[in-house]
Image (cartoon, rainbow, N blue to C red):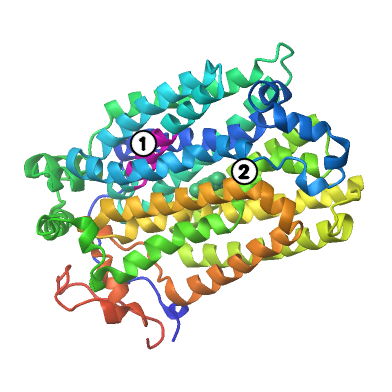
């Protein structure tokens, strides 16, 4: 009687047409939206470990680092609320922006939000690159955040709507792929600019964010809108032509009818924010909230933001720390590829379950090693072998995240919400994700200082909880057409009770199979 017994709908409708070059290209361009997000995630950690940057904006941190007494506690070296505010302010801005982005995405279409996101981000990047004081720096970060809020709100939905159902996972993961590439590029840029002697390397690191912003803006201008969004805005003829074009066949009647049904249902909904609170959307609401919450509680951004700082804490030198961040960045990209190939074949659940288990093992092992070496006082030293083992464990942990919670954290919420609440659902997803990204970014350095090695056990407990949650409550969504997702809830042992019989789709040709009684 668990969610684990559930098998994706075997009887679900098979639409004609498949993956066309046109869809592939549009999805690749749209996924570029992930670059701006990834670049940000990767760039701030390296920049905040560069001395000239700290000298200019955060002299108190430098003082503390050089202060002999403070250095005694390895865990507390970098603890500064102002420094973390630099990293985390972006996510707070993205949180607020994603709420506005919902209305924009619904009213003006997905591509509109992408272009707006790209332009605002561009301005933020320029401001950061030329920053002379902390105000310019933080305002720039806020603009970057607004850009990220719009991009993350629109891109995953765009990808899920464009993709044919059987390829939706792989195409949607293009977004996460771009995020990881953005992070890796940022790590490499930091590694390069840290070598610059003139002390302006950080300006190049921050200013180069303009490049992915330009790619996204120009890309967004060139992209067509999704058939779902065209219908949502009353452009029926255009929507049908677009669907024929993206599926590469004139026979799209079945799929188009589903889109029309979904769009009609959506038109009856005046206020998606109020609607998503109705019991019939409870499964979507709960999962859309919990997935980004859990994604952040894996602790991944401790590594993504602070890898160089963390490796310094472990006793790695400056260069070695930045290099280790490059290594974890590479692992992140390569492991994401695994999910591209596995997600539509093996399904979402198996990736979640395997990834969760692997992360859990790595976190416990890292916690134990740090506990043994640094103890509770935070005094002590790591041998090179110990530090290397920790690096390997971190890589295994990053790999597990990269083929599970990383991509699925964006894919699943974007594919489970029906059209009438999709934009609102996606905003909840982005807002929750950003809120917890913010909280963890803000709290990590002082959590490390206070919880010490226990921090890894803290995240391990959450990974255990989320893995059990997936096992029990997350049905498989592999291959289910996006506007027919209701069938999945109707067949689930727990969620079925929330889905009324009259809810769309009502097509009699559809049925679900479950491997065991639910
Ligand atoms: C998450 C980010 C994370 C990144 C790492 C994304 O899916 O939302 O918070 O930094 O993956 O690759």
Label 1 – label 2 distance at C-alpha = 23 Å
Judge left or right: residue 160 versus residue 381.
left
Judge left or right: residue 76 versus residue 222.
right
Compared to residue 76, the image places residue 461 above or below, namely below
The answer as to whether callout 2 falls within 8 Å of ligand 1 is yes
Coordinates of residue 283 in the picture (x, y in percent): 33, 70
**Quadrant of the image occupied by residue 496:** bottom left
Q: Residue at x 33, y 57 (%)?
A: 415
| Residue receiving disc 1 | 30
- Residue mark closest to the camera, 1 vs 2: 2
Find out whether residue 149 is within the magenta segment: yes
Name the one closer to the observer, 23 or 315. 315
Q: Closer to the N terminus: mark 1 or mark 2?
A: 1
**Does any portion of residue 478 appear in the rendered image?**
no
Coordinates of residue 10 in the picture (x, y in percent): 32, 72
Find out whether residue 66 is within the magenta segment: no
Coordinates of residue 463 in the picture (x, y in percent): 60, 65
**Quadrant of the image occupied by residue 143:** top left
The answer as to whether callout 1 falls within 8 Å of ligand 1 is no
| Residue receiving disc 2 | 304
Mark 2 residue element = helix
Image quarter in which the N terminus is found: bottom left
Q: Residue at x 73, y 24 (%)?
A: 51
Name the one closer to the observer, 173 or 155. 155
Region in magenta: 145-156
Judge left or right: residue 17 versus residue 2.
left
Name the one closer to the observer, 145 or 295. 145
**Does any portion of residue 129 appear in the rendered image?**
yes
């Amino acid at each position: 009687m668990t969610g684990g017994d559930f098998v994706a709908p075997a009887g679900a409708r098979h639409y004609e047409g498949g993956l066309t070059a046109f869809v592939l290209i549009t999805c690749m361009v749209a996924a570029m939206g992930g670059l701006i997000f990834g670049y940000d995630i990767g760039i701030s950690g390296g920049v905040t470990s560069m001395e000239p940057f700290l000298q200019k904006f955060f002299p108190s941190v430098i003082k503390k680092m050089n202060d002999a007494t403070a250095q005694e506690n390895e865990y507390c070296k970098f603890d500064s609320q102002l420094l973390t505010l630099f990293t985390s302010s972006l996510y707070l801005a993205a949180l607020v922006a994603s709420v506005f982005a919902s209305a924009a995405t619904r009213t003006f279409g997905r591509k509109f939000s992408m272009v707006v996101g790209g332009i605002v981000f561009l301005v933020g990047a320029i401001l950061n690159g030329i920053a002379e004081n902390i105000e310019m720096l933080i305002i720039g970060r806020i603009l970057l955040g607004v850009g990220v809020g719009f991009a993350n709100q629109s891109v995953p939905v765009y990808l899920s709507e464009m993709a044919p159902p059987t390829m939706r996972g792989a195409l949607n993961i293009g977004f996460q792929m771009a995020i990881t590439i953005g992070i890796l590029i940022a790590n490499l840029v930091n590694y390069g600019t840290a070598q610059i002697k003139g002390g302006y390397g950080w300006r190049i690191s921050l200013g180069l964010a303009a490049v992915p912003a330009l790619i996204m803006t120009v890309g967004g201008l060139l992209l067509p809108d999704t058939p779902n969004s065209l219908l949502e805005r009353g452009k029926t003829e255009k929507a049908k032509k677009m669907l024929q074009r993206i599926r590469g066949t004139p026979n799209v009647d079945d799929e188009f009818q589903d889109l029309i049904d979904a769009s009609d249902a959506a038109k009856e909904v005046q206020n998606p924010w109020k609607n998503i609170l109705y019991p019939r959307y409870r499964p979507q609401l709960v999962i859309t909230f919990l997935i980004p919450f859990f994604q952040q509680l894996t602790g991944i951004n401790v590594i993504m933001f602070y890898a160089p700082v963390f490796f310094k804490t472990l006793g790695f030198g400056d260069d070695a720390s930045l290099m280790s961040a490059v290594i974890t960045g590479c692992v992140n990209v390569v492991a994401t590829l695994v999910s591209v190939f596995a997600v539509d074949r093996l399904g979402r659940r198996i990736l979640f379950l395997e990834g969760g288990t692997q992360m859990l093992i790595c976190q416990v092992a890292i916690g134990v090693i740090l506990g043994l070496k640094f103890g509770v006082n935070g005094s002590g030293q790591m041998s090179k072998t110990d530090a290397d083992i920790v690096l390997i464990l971190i890589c295994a942990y990053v790999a597990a995240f990269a083929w599970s919670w990383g991509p699925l954290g964006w894919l699943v919420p974007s594919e489970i919400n029906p059209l009438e609440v999709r934009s609102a659902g996606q905003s909840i997803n982005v807002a929750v994700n950003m809120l917890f990204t913010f909280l963890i970014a803000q709290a990590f350095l002082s959590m490390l200082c206070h919880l010490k090695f226990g921090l890894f056990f803290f995240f391990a407990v959450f990974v255990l909880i989320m893995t059990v949650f997936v096992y029990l409550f997350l049905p498989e969504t592999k291959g289910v057409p996006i506007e027919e997702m209701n069938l999945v809830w109707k067949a689930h042992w727990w969620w079925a009770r929330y889905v009324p019989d009259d809810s769309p789709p009502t097509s009699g040709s559809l049925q679900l199979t479950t491997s065991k009684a639910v």
